[in-house]
Image (cartoon, rainbow, N blue to C red):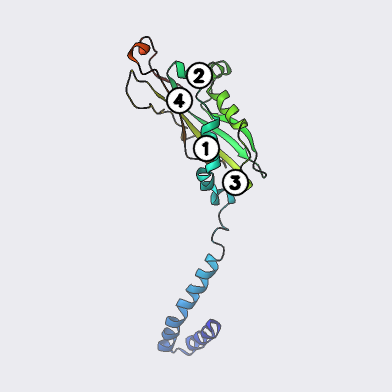
Amino acid sequence: MVTKLIAAFEITLKNGNIMKTLLILVVLLPGIRGIKAQKANEHPDTQLPPKQIFSADLNNDPVFNNVVLNRIHYPAKPASNAIYGRFYASFTIDDVGHIQQVSVLYPKMPTRVSKQYGFESEILAGFRRMPPLNPRLAGNYVLPIAFCFTHFGEGPNPIVPTNRLPREYNIGDRILLSEVKIFAESPSATRSLNGFPASRQIGQ
C-alpha cells in the first residue's frame, strides 16, 4: 500500500498537481512513520552493550547482596579504634559466574598501612568466600563499600564516610554498582567509653 502511494506521489509531483500531492502526503506520512517506529522497536536493546542491559540486575540480585553483607566483615582493629572509610572494589564475573580479578581501586594505601588497618585484606577475603553467581551477570564491576562506625560517645547515629572516588578517576568499562554499608560500633556504656579513641576517617 505504501509503495503504491509513493509511486502516485511521484507522478502527481511531476504533473504539478499540488492539491493531489498534498493529499497523498497526508495519507503517506503516518504509514512511513509507523514503519520506522516498528523497525526501531523490533530489537530495542540491540543498540545497548549487554553490560548496560543487565547493569541493574546485579544491584537487585538477592544472592549477591546477601553474600556481600555476610562475607565482608568490619576488621577488628579499625572497629576497636573507631576508624572508618569508604573503599571501591573492582571485580569481574566470568562466563560461568565465578568472581575473578578482585582488587581495591581506591583508596590506594602503602602496603604497610593497608595491612595495619585490614580493610583491603577483609574485602579481598570476603570476595574469595563468595559462591558462583548467575553467568548472565558476567561483566566488570566496581562496588563501593562504606565501613560506617557508630561512636556512642559522639552521637547515636552511624558515621558515614565522606571520601569518594575522584571524578577524574577512570573506571573504564566497569559498571559502578550501588554502595553497600558494613557497620561497627563502640561500647555504649559510659564507663567503657572512657579512654575510647575519637572516630577517624581514613582514605581521604
Q: Calculate the distance from the C-alpha at mark 3 to the C-alpha at mark 1.
A: 16 Å
Pointer 3 with pointer 2, Cβ within 8 A: no
Task: Report which residue position mark 3 lands on.
Answer: 137
What amino acid is labelled 2 in the image?
Ala
x and y, in percent, of residue 1 in the image:
53, 84
Which of the two labelled residues, at mark 1 and mark 4, occupies the earlier sequence position?
A: 1
Other residues around mark 4 within 10 Å, as few (<14) / some (14–19) / many (≥20): many
Residue at 36% in and 18% down: 188
Tag 4 residue:
85
Q: Quadrant of the C terminus?
A: top left
Separation of residues labelled 1 and 2 (CA atoms):
21 Å
Chain-order first, disc 1 or disc 2? 1
Query: Is 67 situated left or right of 82 in this image?
Result: right
Alpha carbon distance from label 3 to label 4 = 28 Å
| Residue type beneath disc 3 | Leu
* Image location (x, y in percent) of residue 23: 42, 85
* In front of the other: 134 or 140: 134
Asked if 149 appears above or below 56 in the picture, the reply is: above
Give residue 66's mark: 1
Tell which circle, 3 or 4, labels the residue nearer the N-terminal end: 4
**Marks 1 and 4, how far apart in space?**
21 Å
Q: Nearer the viewer, mark 3 or mark 4?
A: 3
Marks 2 and 4, how far apart at CA: 14 Å
In the depicted structure, whether residue 176 falls above or below residue 151: below
Q: Earlier in the sequence, mark 2 or mark 4?
A: 2
The residue shown at (65%, 39%) is 98
Q: Residues within 10 Å of mark 1 (few under 14, many from 20)?
A: few
Residue that lies at the very extreme toward the top in this rendered image: 195
Closer to us: mark 1 or mark 4?
A: 1
Q: Which residue is mark 2?
A: 76
The tag earlier along the polypeptide, 3 or 2, is 2
